Image (cartoon, helix red, strand yellow):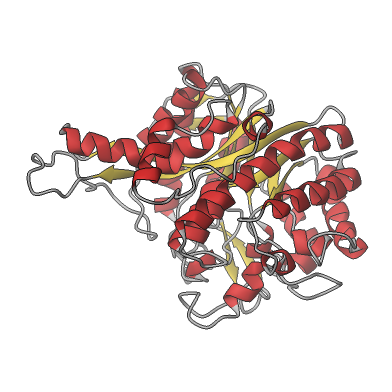
Amino acid sequence: MAQLHFPPEFLWGSATSSYQIEGAWDENGKGESIWDRFTHTPGKIEDGSTGDVACDHYHRWADDVAMMSRLGLQAYRFSISWPRILPDGRGRVNQAGLDFYSRLVDGLLEANIVPFVTLYHWDLPQALQDEGGWPMRSTGEAFVDYADVVSRALGDRVKNWITHNEPWCIGFLSHQIGEHAPGHQDWQEALRASHHVLLSHGWAVPVIRANSLDAEVGITLNYTYATPASSSPADMAAARWFDGYFNRWFTDPVYGRHYPADMVADFTAAGHLPNGLDFVQSGDMEIIAAPTDFLGVNYYTRAVLRDESPDNGTQTVFTDLEQTEMGWEIYPEGLYRLLCRLYFDYEAPKLYITENGASYSDGPDADGKVRDHRRTEYMRQHFIAAYRAIQAGAPVKGYFVWSLMDNFEWAKGYLQRFGMVWVDFETQQRIPKESMHWVSRVIAENAVSWE
């Protein structure tokens, strides 16, 4: 069986986020987040659940780090809870919160696991939301103060920093579509929020560098590969628009290209920018394009775009491939093409796959084992896609599987399980799934089988 060997320095890890695993939502001085408020509002979460306890990682972190070590993980990407550090969003620092993450970082380093810290994975302090949230420029300014506090406290030991996770979700999913906290549906809010998230990223990069010498700093963007449903002009235009809305609106400014002109025109024509880009001040775009060391890439699926006009041509591309339980089509070719595009089109100096994974509900069999063969095959196909991108010249330096363990899956609650470790949310028992054991072997061999 042919083995595809990754570069010797390739880094293998897994990822989580604070609200999804920590629990302890109101303990030891932590302030309320927008997700605390959102999940406690009836009707917002599909199964009516909250992240109040989740995986109880706040109390069980030492056992979880020991588990990661046994499973051979080389790196761990986790996020900091902003309201656990600054309960009011700015000003007063909660030392107990900083101490928690300091212990976690020390534990990881003692286990020879490289910590990758994400400063913002969506749990904005509710106090800042009450002032207007991300549509307000002041929230971006508060983020820089928060980044300063955390990087001063951990910067002597953490050398890999991600400012934001998935600005598209922070901007559009949360403020235009309304599926995520704070649950608004306002195009103007979404566009302003997106800008202030990107601006706060650019502001924070030099602050983190000053506080964490020799650190590498980047941002994580989420991508959906856009495929036209046919070669008709209408479908090509639909794919172009989706790619601009989902992918280019964030990648272009990060790499110094400003906001895509075609999308500015489209948003203006649709009435989403009645006052133009009035939220963009002089110098903002240069700040957003602050040089970074790497780009984090989150990828799960593709979108097949179809213009439904009656005179459109015959559809030739269909979403008829296997899907995960999230209803996301399994399309590893999209990861390969995306990684190549990000390097060859944007010249990203270094790429990390910071999230990729699949939701399957397979639970323990009678013998206590979780035989999640579908997840194993999903990961194998995507590992191969990453390998192919490396062979094509893309500087892919690491792979963080989403997720380490089953957790609170945002608007889906506990109905979706992305983890490589099964969690019984009643007892907090953890059972590594067969996919996790398979990934452990991949890490040990630094290779994946072709078939």
Residue 213 appearing in the image:
yes
Q: What x and y, as percent, mark residue 401?
A: 56, 45
Question: Residue at 66% across / 48% down in the picture?
Answer: 71
Q: Is residue 428 above or below residue 305?
A: below
- Left or right: 240, with 373 as reference point: left
- Left or right: 176, with 234 as reference point: right
Residue 132 or 208: which is nearer the viewer? 132
Residue 93 or 188: which is nearer the viewer? 188
- Left or right: 339, with 33 as reference point: left
Q: Where the N terminus falls, by quadrant?
A: top left
Residue 54 appearing in the image:
no
Question: Residue at 52% across / 83% down in the picture?
Answer: 42
Q: How many marks?
A: 0
Residue 8 or 394: which is nearer the viewer? 394
Q: What x and y, as percent, mark residue 303?
A: 32, 45
- Left or right: 210, with 134 as reference point: right
Q: Where the C terminus falls, by quadrant?
A: top left
Q: What x and y, as percent, mark residue 364?
A: 50, 68
Residue 376 or 137: which is nearer the viewer? 137
Q: Quadrant of residue 36?
A: bottom right
Q: Residue furthest bottom?
A: 42
Q: What x and y, as percent, mark residue 266?
A: 36, 41
